[in-house]
Amino acid sequence: MSSQTRPGGLLAQLAGLVFVTAGLLLVIGGVWSLLVGGPLYYLLTGLGLTLTGLLVWLRNPAALVLYALIGFIALIWSFYISGCDFWGLMPRLNIFFILGILLLLPPVTRALAPNRIATGLLGVVVALTGGLLGSSFFASPHTQEGELSTALINPVPEDPEHVPADEWKAYGRTHAGDRWSPLKQINSGNVGQLKLAWVMHTHDFPQPNDSAEPTNEATPLAFDNTLYFCSLHQKLFAVDGATGKTKWVFDPHLHDNPTYQHLTCRGVSMHETPANAVDSSGQPVSQTDCAKRLVLPVNDGRIIEVDAATGKKCTAFGQDGEVDMRVPFQPYTTPGQYEPTSPPVITDKYVIVNSAITDNGSVRQASGATRAYDIYTGKMVWVFDAANPDPNEMPSPEHPHFHPNSPNSWAISAYDKKLNLVYIPMGIGTPDEWGGYRTKDAERFVPGILALNADTGKLAWFFQTVHHDLWDMDVPAQPSLVDVTRQDGTLVPAIYIPTKTGDIFVLDRRNGQPIVPITEQNAPQTPAPGDWVSPTQPHSGLSLRPKERLSEKDIWGATIFDQMVCNIYFHSLRYDGIYTPPSIQGTLVFPGNLGMFEWGGMGVDPQREVAFVNPISLPFVSQLVPRGPGNPLWPDPQAGAHKSTGETGLQPAYGIPFAIRLHPFLNPLLEKIGIPLPCRTPPWGSVAGLDLRTNKVVWEHPNGTMRDSLHKSSLPLPLPPFHIGVPSLGGPLVTAGNLAVLTSTQDDEIRAYNLTNGKEIWQARLPAGGQATPMTYAINGRQYIVTYAGGHGSFGSRMGDTLLAYALPDNTASATEGAKTVQGGTSASTTEGKTEASSGSTP
C-alpha cells in the first residue's frame, strides 16, 4: 500500500503539523536564547521536532526513530539538570511525553507503517519518560528530615513582663517577639480535633479610594477575656473571646488616600496603669481613667489611645486622645508618605513609635525618626533621628524639623524590660535601589538593629546587616529575644535577627557581639552610574539562603515553551549571585525584595530553645530606568499626586538619575494573561525547624499549594492541592503543646505542624487569605487559636474580613454541632461613644 492510501493519513498530517509548530517555536526561541547567552539545547531540539514533523507529514517511518532519539536526549538532559525533582523535570519532559504518546497512537503508526524496532524504540523512550516523571512525583529532593530535641532545656524561661499564661498582651505575646504560648491544651496529639468555635466579621473591605496595597495583617491581643485587633481601615474592635460577639468598635476615621503606598495595621499595643503611676513631669495619674489603654497606629500619621474597657479615647493623651506624628515635619509632598503600620513598643512609661516611609518616592520625604511619647500625656520625651549628626536632637526653634528622608523602621521592635533596651529593626532611607546621593550620616545606622536605652533613646549598640544597601534589604521582622543555654549550662541573653537575605544574625543582646560567626565575603562589583558598592557583605553562620547561586537548573515553567521564555529572561538580566548591583540592563535579585524573611518573624519555644520559621524563595527583578519623556526628575507640581502602584511596578524615585522598576521574577508570557507563575523552580516557600543551641537547620519541608493562585487570573480554575511550596507572608505561632500554627501561605489555609519534625498534622480552609500571624489564649480553661483571614492586596490572596477562633470540642451541644458565626455580635458597640446595634447569625 502506498503512503498516499495508508489509513490514518489525516491524523498523521495533523500530528506532523503539531510537531512542526512546536519545533518552530523552539527554533525561534532557541535563536533568541543563543543571542542572550542561553543554551543551544532549545534550537537543536526545535530543529529536531521540526524535522520530525515534516517526516510525519510525509508519513515517513523514520520520524519515530528520530523522535525516539530526541526524546532520549531530552530525558538524559532533564535528568542531568533536575535529578529526581518532579517540578524541575515536569516542564522539561511533559511535552515530550505527550508528543511521544501522540506518535504511538495506532492511527498514526498505521499511517507511518514503521517496523517493530522503531515502534518499540519509541515506546521504550516514552515509557522511561513517563516512569521518571511518575516516580519523581513521590520523591522529596527539597525535604530535609530531622527531629528537634523535646527536652525542656530552659523549663522556666524568664518573662520580665509577667504575662499570664492564658493571655496575649503584645504583638508577639510579649515584647520578646517569640510568638510562643505556654498553653498546651491543644497539642500535637489532639490538634486534629480542632473545630471552629466562633467566627466574627468586621465588614471592613477595600474601598475605591484605598491604597494600591490593602493588607490585613493584624494579630489580636487577648486579656480580660477579650480580644482587641484592628481591621483594614484601622477600626479597633473589642471582641468577647468566648463567643466572638463585638463589645465595642472604635473608628479613627482614617484620612484615606489612593496615594498611600500601604493600607496596613499589624496590631495594637496595650498598657496597664500601675499603682502610684506618675507621668513624665511627675504628676500623679488616675487609676480609674483608662486603667488599661490600647495604642492604635493610624496610617494617616496619628497614634490614638483608647480605653480598653469602654472603647472611648483617653483624652489626656495628646490632643483629645491623639498625637499627630506628622509634627514636627516639613510639609508633605504626597499624602500618606509617613504611615505607622506596626504596633509600638510600650514600656512602663513610654510609647516608642516607628513608621513606614514611602519606598522609592523621592529624596524629599518625611523623616523616619523613632520617637518616644509619655504614655499618659502624649508629650514627646526623646527622639532617635538616624540621619541627623546628633540623632537625639529634639526639635527646637533653631531646628524645628526632623532630618528629611531619614532612615525609618516599619517593622515591629522588641524590648527587653530587664536590660531596658529597645531593639529597632532599621531600613534604609528612600530611594532604595540607588544610593549615590546618600551621606555617611544617612547610612550609619542602616540597615540593621539599633539597641537604644528605652528611657533616653541613647545608643547602646548597633549592628549593620548589609553595607550600602541597594536591594531594599531592610531588617523586616521583629527580632526574637531568647536566653540560650551554652554547653557549660550558663544562659546567654541572645537576639535573633531574621533578614531578607535569609541570614539570621545571632548576637548577645547586651552588647551586640556575635554569638554565631559572621564573615565578610566578597560581593559583586560594577555599580550603576554615579553609585558605589561595598566590596564585601556580612554573612551569618545561621542562614536559610540556598547555598548555590541560581543557574540553568533553577529556571522553570509549566512546559518547555514558557520555561524557555524564562530561560531567555534569566540570561537577559544581570546576575552575579547575591548582592548583584541594580542596573539599567535589569538585575535579578535573589533573595528578592520580598525577602526570605518578612515581618512575621520567627516562632520560638524558649523552653526547648528551638524555633519554627517560614522562609520565602522568590527572586525579584530590579531595573534602573534613566530619566526621559514620561519619567521626569521631579513631578509636575500642577499635575497633583498620582495613585500609588504599591511596591512593584515603576517607582518614581524623584530626585535621583533613575526611576526604578521592581517586580517578582515571573513568567512574562503567562503574566500577561494573569497567571503569576514564577520563573524559578519550586519550592518558593517552606517551613523549617532550628535548634538554637547548635544554630542548625534540623528539618525543612516545602509548604503550601497553588490551589488558590489563579483566583484573580483570566483562568480562575482551581489547581490540584499539591504541596509545591508557595510563598508565605506572616509569622508562625508556637506553643508548649509541641505545636506550630501558620496561616500565611498563598493558599487560603490554616495549618498546624508537629514542632519536633515539621510534619503537617492538621489543616482547614479559610474564607480568605490568611496573611496575618495567629495567636492563642484561654478562657475558663478552654484554649482558642485565632487568626484574621482578611487577604492581602499586593500578595494577590483573596480579600475578606473574618476573624476565626478554633478550639477543641467541649461538652456542650453548641461546640459539637458547629461554629457560631457572629456578625459583629448582638451586644452594644460604640464608635467614639456612639452605640451601634450588631446582628448575629448561625451558619
Image: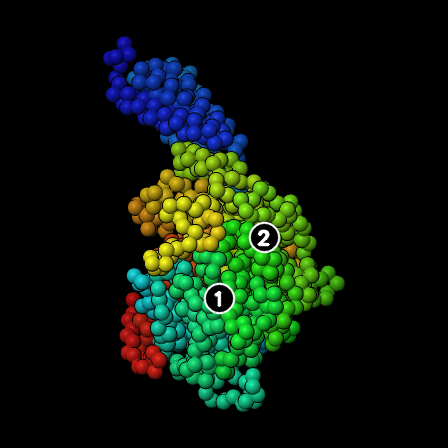
Q: Is residue 841 left or right of residue 98?
A: left
Q: Is residue 228 left or right of residue 469?
A: left
**Residue appearing at x 35%, y 48% in the figure:** 710
In this orientation, which residue lies closer to the viewer: 410 or 343? Answer: 410
Q: Report helix, strand or loop for mark 1.
A: loop
Q: Position of residue 329 (x, y in %)?
A: 47, 69
Work out whether 546 lies above or below 309.
above
**Residue appearing at x 29%, y 79% in the figure:** 836
Quadrant (top left, top right, bottom left, bottom right) of the N terminus: top left
Three-letter code for the amino acid on which mark 1 is drawn = Ser
Work out whether 548 lies above or below 273.
above
Three-letter code for the amino acid on which mark 2 is drawn = His
Q: Which residue is mark 1?
A: 355
Report crowding for label 2: few under 14, some 14 to 19, many 20 or more residues within 10 A (C-alpha).
many
Q: Report helix, strand or loop for mark 2.
A: loop
**What's the distance in space between the residues labelled 2 and 1, CA to CA?**
21 Å
Q: Which residue is mark 2?
A: 468
Question: Which of the two marks, 2 or 1, is nearer to us in this view?
Answer: 2
Work out whether 193 lies above or below 294.
above
Q: How many marks can you see?
A: 2
- Can residue 687 be seen here? The reply is no
Direction front: furthest residue = 398
**Residue appearing at x 43%, y 51% in the figure:** 633
Direction top: furthest residue = 1
In this orientation, which residue lies closer to the viewer: 109 or 264? Answer: 264
Task: Give the colouring mode of the picture.
Answer: rainbow
**Residue appearing at x 54%, y 72% in the figure:** 399
Q: Position of residue 166 (x, y in %)?
A: 51, 74
In this orientation, which residue lies closer to the viewer: 401 or 302? Answer: 401
Q: Is residue 47 left or right of residue 738?
A: left
